Each structure stands twice: as C-alpha cells, then as structure tokens.
Amino acid sequence: MDVIEKLRKSLKSKSYEPFIRHIRFPHFKNLTPYLNIDFKFPITALVGPNGSNKSSILRAIACCPHFKNLSEYWFETDVDPIDESGGRPRYIFGYIDQHSNKTAEVIQTRISRPGKNEVWEPSRPLKIDGMETLVPLRPGITVPGRTSTRWAGIKKDVTILDFRSEISAFDKILYHGDAAEHFRKKSSKDILRQRSKHLRKVIREDLKSYRPFKGHEETVFSNELLPPESVKIISDIIGKEYSEIRLIEHSLLENRSHTAILKSKGLTYSEAFAGSGEFAVVMLVKKTMSAPPRSLIILDEPEVSLHPGAQLKLMDFLLRESLNRHHQIVISTHSKLIVDKLPPEAIVLLQPNPATYKITAQGDVNPAEAFFHLGQVPASKKKIFVEDPLACELVRKTLRILGEGAFNQFEVMWYPGGAPSIFQKCMTGLFQTNDTNSYFLLDGDQKPQTEIINPQRIPEADHESIKEQLNNHRLKSVG
C-alpha cells in the first residue's frame, strides 16, 4: 500500500480528529458568495493565479481552531476599507463532533465597534448561511462539545510558515533594515559588523541567555542543536550532507528572528553564506517536527527558493509526517511538482469567474488540468487514435464535457484505413518506440462472425479444413 492509500485509510479511521472538514465563505473578500472548500485528504493544496485570495483563505483556515484572531491579518484602513454591502464578512468551518458524531459548524464574524479595535468572534448559527440552529440548553444543563446556543469549536495546535517572509536575521537587517538604519544612524552593514561579535559569543559559548546592552533586555530566546534525525532530513531535502545544524532565535540584529549555523564537510557557515532555500528548509523541518501530533500546519508557497528536486523531497517529508503524526496540512502553491505528489481529491483550483471577477473554487482536480488553467500547457499531449472522423468528433465532444483542462491534454486523431490499418501500421510502429502516450479507441466490429469448429467434434478427414479456418482467423486478427 503506497503512502497515498495509507493516508486515505488513516483519515477514514478518524486518526486525524479533530479535523477541519470544510470551510465556507458567505461573504469574504473577493470570493464568490458561499464559496466552499472540502478537505477530503490530510494534505490539501490550494492552486490558483496571483490575486486568487489563496493567502487570505489560508489565514482564515489557520484561525479556525481559536489560534489567532483574523483581525491580526485582515483589518480596515482608509486606503482599504472592508466592504460590508453583502453583510458582515464571515466564514464557517465544519468538523465532526466527537461526542455526538454529528457534523458541527462554527461561524466566525467580523465585529467592528466604534472606538474599539475590530475583532472576529463566533456567533450563533445563521439559517441564511445554511447552518443548523441548535435548541438552547436549559440553565444548568451541559452537553460535551456545545455551549448554550452553538457548537464549541475545536482545539488544535497551529503552525504557520509563510516562505515569502520566513527570512533569516541576517537577511532581515541587510535587506529590510531601513528603519534600523534611520534609528541607529548607521548602515545595515555597520550594524551587522557591530552586532555579529555578540552573536559569535552566543554561538561559541552555547549561551541560552544573553543581555549585552546594559543588561536590560533578553536577546536570546532559544539556542539549540537540531537532533540528528532533523539534520538527516534537511540533508536529504537539500541534497547536501550536513553534520550539524544550530538554530538560534535572537534579537541581536535588531529584529527578533532566527540564525542558522550549518556545518558541512568541515565548513561552518551561517545563513549569510547559505542559500535562502537552505534556511527555509531548516525552518520548515524544525517547526513541522516540533509541532504536537494532530496539528494544523499552514504552508504558504513552500516552493520559494527550492530547486525542483528539493520540492519533491519536501513533499515526501510532508506526506510521511502527516501519516505518522496525523497532521492536517494545507498548502498554497504555484508548483506543479508539489501538486503532482497529491491525488485529485487533495487539489483545489481557485480562479476568477470571467463574468463576475469573483474567485471560484473547484475541488477534485487533476494536477495537469489545474495547471492548464494557470497557463501551463502540457509539453506533449496524449494521443487518442480512432477509426474514422465520426469517432474522432464523438471523443472530442466527450473530452470537452470533462472540461477545457482535460480537453487540451489530448490530441484525437483518426487513422485512415480503419482498424486493420491501425493494427498493421500505426500500433506496431508505436510499440517499437516504447510509446506510452498513445491510446486506441476502436469501433469493436472486428469480432469474427463465424464460429471456429471444435476439433473434438469433427471427423478426422476434416483436419485440413480446421487448419484452414484457424489460419484465416489468425490472419483476420492480425489484420
């Protein structure tokens, strides 16, 4: 049984509970009203063009298990007011309540109070949004999994990694240190040179605490060597053998961030000399392997800075971690290599509706079809050979029904001469070249009408007649 089947089986056995089964958006940003996404596999990939609200959907999913308030990610400004013409922005997520075995739904609604910060809060079920209303519990009565008028929701540890912003302490100060330059009246390079001696001291002395600036503030929040298992996994993903990896969380370079110290074949270096992909993989492996079992892990474009081989190895790691530790993982990606590792039920295609410009969601999508809609045309189309022009049009019409993505993956061709010509010329040539990209749909009218006589029922004198019939049948089959 391969890992995909094992994951399917494990999800059916409820090993992943509590598991977010679906999320619905009655009114949320530029999504089509009541857009729904079902989670049918432990790992789900959101695929779509730029501007299809993938990151916003990821943030909403992350906030389902009472993790953070969505207002930390989406808030109103004078430049970007929040539209409430379709009602208050809100979303609904569903899960299976373990006490009643029912599908429970919780709604999160944006509440804006004059003079106060906006927040997203649970509210009572709304019939207008297709939710089932609950009979209020009488005073003093408690039911597991419920409050008086609504479902209680789920508790689940959450890990978020946004690989566009998951950058090292060195890169933060060097490329995003304008504020520090203005405040310190020094260039980013000067700050790095001045502060690096403190970081070197922390590394060499393995310090778990360090207060260098008049002893007022702590600057080291963690300083650890990654376990050998993590080092081995990182080496496998990157394709480079490391002997030791140290990860330090600190604020020695102004902003609180991480520094990775990597040892490889006698060479020791920090992320200043490492590739950004190395640092990203270190952080992903560290945070994923540190997450408690049955966590919700959100990955926003994990392919950033990773070469193709690393992307494939990364997915192998995530599939194993999800299977072994029952993590629910949701990924946004533009990488076909990542999506190719997943079954259709794990892929959700987000794209704008040409008429309304609102974002729609389509589940159970084949990877090739999903990326066709993103403008990636198959390098070589599959060929379907048929006997005549009528069969050619029938097959093309059938493919069109399956969708534009499916239609454009195939080239339907009719081969002159019918089935005999296909068998004798077309098929034999393709077999000799080991072609695995061609298919044949025949009319099925080549079955012989005359029955071959059983030799046991024929007199001995007619053996020559039997041989002649067999030879004729063999010639027809080949032809």
Image (cartoon, rainbow, N blue to C red):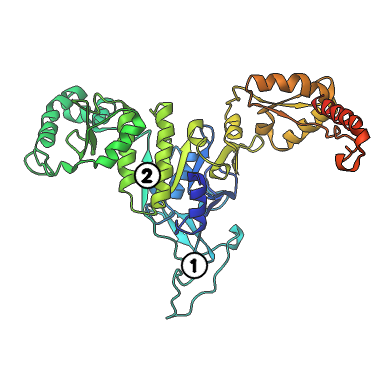
Residue at the extreme front: 460
Answer yes or no: is residue 280 visible: no
Discs 2/1, front = 2
Q: Does the CB distance between marks 2 and 1 fall below 8 Å?
A: no
Dot 2 crowding, Cα within 10 Å, few <14, some 14–19, many 20+:
some
87 vs 317, nearest the viewer: 317
Q: Position of residue 275 (x, y in %)?
A: 30, 25
Q: Report the residue at 61% width, 36% height from top.
A: 357
221 vs 243, nearest the viewer: 243
- Under circle 1, the secondary element is loop
Q: Report the residue at 31% width, 35% height from top.
A: 234
262 vs 145, nearest the viewer: 262
Residue under pointer 2? 160
Earlier in the chain: of badge 2 and badge 1, it is: 1
Quarter location, residue 309: top left
- Under circle 2, the secondary element is strand
Give above or below for 142 relative to 47: below
Question: Which circle marks residue 150 in the picture?
Answer: 1
Q: Position of residue 430 (x, y in %)?
A: 68, 21
Q: Amino acid at mark 2?
A: Ile
Q: Is residue 47 left or right of residue 273?
A: right
Q: Position of residue 403 (x, y in %)?
A: 69, 36
Quarter location, residue 167: top left
Answer yes or no: is residue 47 visible: yes
Question: Which circle marks residue 214 in the picture?
Answer: none
Q: Report the residue at 53% width, 32% height from top.
A: 49
Quarter of the image where the C terminus is located: top right
**Marks 2 and 1, how far apart at CA:** 28 Å
Q: Is residue 362 left or right of residue 196?
A: right
Give above or below for 386 relative to 4: above
Quarter location, residue 352: top right
Q: Amino acid at mark 1?
A: Arg
